[in-house]
Image (cartoon, coloured by chain):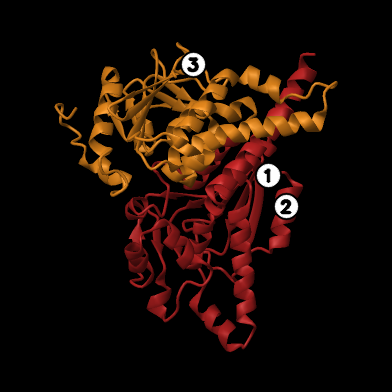
Chain colours: A orange, B red
Amino acid sequence: MKQIRHTLAFNITDGIGHLELNQPPANQMNAEFFSEFNKLVDELRVMKGLKAIVISSKGRHFSSGANVEELLEQAGTPGERNHAEMKENWNTISERNSRSFLFFEETEIPVIAAIRGVCIGCAFELAMFSHFRFCGEDAVFGLPETTFNLMPGLGGIRKIAALCGQAKAIELLLKGNTFGAEEAQLNHLVDKIVPRRKVVEFSMAFARKVMKNYKKQKASLYLRQIPLDDPFYI
Amino acid sequence: MIDKKIKDDIGIIILENPPHNYLQKPEFIPVSELREWIEGTHLKALVISGSGRHFSGGAKLDSIFTMAEAGEPMEGQMEKGKELLDYLQDLNIPVAAAISGVCFGGGLEIALACHMRICSENALFAFPETNLGLMPGLGGTFRLGERLSLKNSLKMILGGDIINAEEALLLKVVDTIVKDEEPLSYTLHFLRKITEGRPLKIINYVMQALKNSKRLPAEESMREETRMFCDLARIESNRRKIANP
């Protein structure tokens, strides 16, 4: 049975699952998105025959992350409701979201984020939970949460520290600034910059190449095998 | 021996025993005094630097031998020094070392306990202990081993080689080399830039989450991160309600 989804699309071709965020142009990751996303991840956990996952988005941008207004509304505690119960519920929802993110790190098949345009906040967190990140030259990254008096909350702090080291992580987290593709690559936050129009195509081709014997080698070894200057690689 | 200052909510600790700023004892500042100062003044960040041209040459050899010969409880002194470095590393505010000139032995151990190391082009790093029949004793072998491959750690610790700023950056012993500016003024400016306008609670939470990510299993550290995030979201949500009822 084909699942009806509004905020995202999931299609399988030749064993490669293609997850697309589908609320262009910003592809905001709102409560409705997370509800469908969590359901999809639960299906993926038990899905047989999947050999790789590529995550991308419809339209110009990857995603601008969470909807801060909606999120604060949910977090707030209206006086008439039971404070403790609300608090409990909301923590549970947020934890569920972060467990779904962790699935992409822990799964045995390669997960590739194909990033065009803006990729900030929890969208960047999701991308960091992938095993590989390829982006267009126009990509913009950042974890701006602290500029809203918040902090990344779905495991992004753990991921960014592992990728770019403690000192850089402190800077990027506290400053909350955005930065471009080249700076991201310099800090090991993306693996390769490809022409914007080719990001998804490249990621798919890469998925086909690595899915056969993934996990026999380390992720970094796969990356070293990409001929960086070969225009005919795809 | 130690000069403490505060500028824009950033604490500055200067190791002061020129010219080489040798450390008189492992616990170069009592932990209790440091804690009182940091918590009492609500510091948002901390920087450690040396007076004059050098960071610190570490412990002076004859003072180590005097300490050993005197039959003093040397282990106790070393333990106190280690507690101090652990305290610095565990602080929930960014702690930076601003390094110029020599950063040897115990000096390097202090720098490695900081969250970031920023140095001048003329900075030099070494663990010369093994050349003198000793070894690093304040957690330096452990902290260096966390950052370097075993091969490079051994080269520095057993070889006792002196490395310059460029090599230190390549090995990731330091995070940044500063050109045309004093490392201390650069570091102060940098710390102000990343902490300005950030409530202390957010700085504390982010630092705590970074610490958790190193020490806790993935799921546990993420649960804690989410918990802290939810706490901040509730505070911010209520703040906005009060601001715009």
Q: Where is residue B109? Give x, y as percent.
A: 50, 63
Q: Is residue A109 above or below residue A124?
A: below
Under mark 1, the amino acid is Leu
Residue A5 numbered mark, or none: 3
Left or right? Give the position of B107 relative to A59: right
Q: Is B244 above or below relative to A230?
A: above
Q: In terms of secondary structure, where does tag 1 sit?
A: loop
To the question of a shared chain for discs 1 and 3, the answer is no
- Residue identifier under label 1: B43
What is the tally of numbered marks visible in this picture?
Answer: 3
Q: Amino acid at mark 3?
A: Arg
User: For this rendering, which residue is in front, B160 or A195?
Assistant: A195
Tell me the element at label 3.
loop
> Which is nearer the N-term, disc 1 or disc 2?
2
Cα–Cα span, label 1 and label 2: 8 Å
Return the x and y of residue A202 as percentages of the image width and height.
25, 26
Residue A164 visible, this angle: no
C-beta proximity under 8 Å, tags 1 and 2:
yes
The residue located at (62%, 37%) in the rendering is B226
Which labelled disc corresponds to residue B151? Answer: none
Q: Report the front residue among B157 and B131.
A: B157
Disc 2 marks a residue whose amino acid type is Trp
Q: Residue at x 70, y 34 (%)?
A: B231
Q: Disc 2, disc 3: CB below 8 Å?
A: no
Q: Specify the subunit that label 1 lies on.
A: B
Residue B72, above or below B77? below
Is disc 1 in the same subunit as disc 2? yes
